[in-house]
Image (cartoon, helix red, strand yellow):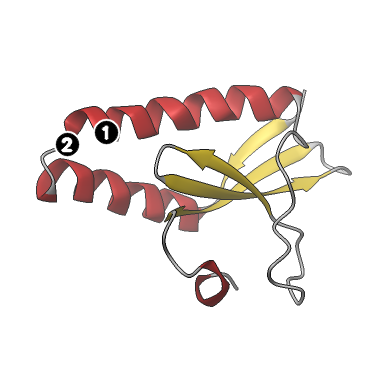
Amino acid sequence: MYKIEYRSAVLRDLEEATTYLCNELQALTAANRLLDGLDTLAQNLSEQPYMFRAYGSVLTLSDTYRIAPIDSYILFYTVDEAKQTVSFCRLFYNRRDFDNLLP
């Protein structure tokens, strides 16, 4: 099994998304679905880290991002074979311009 690592940027993204869903939209159910979806995804990716496709839009990335859908959001993650680690990197609303948001 692979270890799951949450980078600081994804934790900020998650906080912003849940705060927006709860406070601005009053959508507590949607916020809970997002959190539950992330937990389920972590369990699945710890066993099958390559279950989602690579993100091929940005060719200059130093890491190869893979993308996984969670409701209306997209999780960007990397797989480190040497460390047997899946790193959750960023979480964006699915209609954002990812190319301009990724490093």
| Residue sitting nearer the eye, 87 or 50 | 50
Please name the amino acid that badge 1 sits on: Ala
Residue linked to disc 2: 27
Residue linked to disc 1: 30
Q: Secondary structure at mark 1?
A: helix
Q: Is residue 81 above or below residue 54?
A: above
Taking the spot 73% from the left edge, 46% from the top edge, the residue there is 53
Looking at the image, residue 31 sits to the left or right of residue 97; the answer is: left
Q: Residue furthest right?
A: 82
Instruction: Answer few, some or many: residues within 10 Å of disc 2's Cα (few below 14, many 20 plus, some between 14 and 19).
Output: some
Label total for image = 2
On the image, which quarter does residue 31 sit in? top left
Q: Measuring from the top left, give residue 65's x and y in whole percent.
A: 70, 56
Please name the amino acid that badge 2 sits on: Ala
In the picture, the quarter occupied by the N terminus is top right
Instruction: Answer few, some or many: residues within 10 Å of disc 1's Cα (few below 14, many 20 plus, some between 14 and 19).
Output: some
Q: Measuring from the top left, give residue 2's x and y in whole percent.
A: 75, 29
Taking the spot 70% from the left edge, 31% from the top edge, the residue there is 3
Q: Is residue 18 above or below residue 44?
A: below
The answer to whether the residues at label 1 and label 2 have Cβ atoms under 8 Å apart is yes
Q: Is residue 1 above or below residue 59?
A: above
Q: CA distance from mark 1 to mark 2?
A: 5 Å
Residue 41: which disc? none
